[in-house]
Image: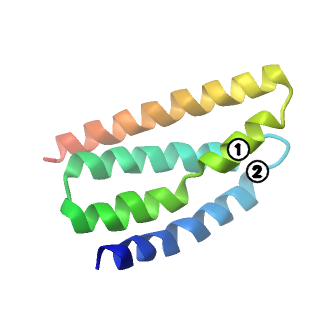
Amino acid sequence: MTALLVVLGAAVGAPLRYACTHLLDGPWPRGTLAVNTVGSGLFGLVAALSLGGAGWALLGTGFCGAFTTFSSFAVQATARPAREAAGYVAATTVLALGACAAGWALGSALGG
């Protein structure tokens, strides 16, 4: 059952990530930055809400795992000139960690 929940979450997260990055990415990877930031915020929220194993499998591992992308981030960062890559890595790190913390704070405030 857990594997099926992961698959169901990923079946929604992966196409949504593709759509966002396809629409927003250009010379600068805005789409990847956006999905990693939003996904990190949702991940923090889901973690704070303590939804149990089934909720975590569906939303945390499945949806957020498929919606966010480290591999695209890594490729996009290394394909840029050093200064631009450093800015992209710094922006992604700060925004993703900040979003995760904000999601956790929201989830905690909601009673998680």
Q: Position of residue 53 (x, y in %)?
A: 22, 63
Q: Residue at x 50, y 36 (%)?
A: 96
Disc 2 residue type?
Asp
Disc 1 residue type?
Arg
Q: Position of residue 81 (x, y in %)?
A: 86, 26
Note whether residue 29 is visible: no
Rendered view: 101 above or below 46: above
Q: Position of residue 83 (x, y in %)?
A: 80, 19
How far apart marks 2 and 1 lie (CA) works out to 5 Å
**In the picture, residue 98 is in which quadrant?**
top left
**In the picture, residue 73 is in which quadrant?**
top right
Q: Residue at x 36, y 63 (%)?
A: 59
Label 2 SS: loop
Rendered view: 67 above or below 103: below
Of residues 5 and 18, the one nearer the viewer is: 5
Q: Which mark is residue 14?
A: none
Q: Which residue position holds label 1?
A: 30
Q: Which residue position holds label 2?
A: 25
Rendered view: 112 above or below 88: below
Marks 2 and 1 close (CB-CB < 8 Å): yes
For marks 2 and 1, the one nearer the N-term is 2
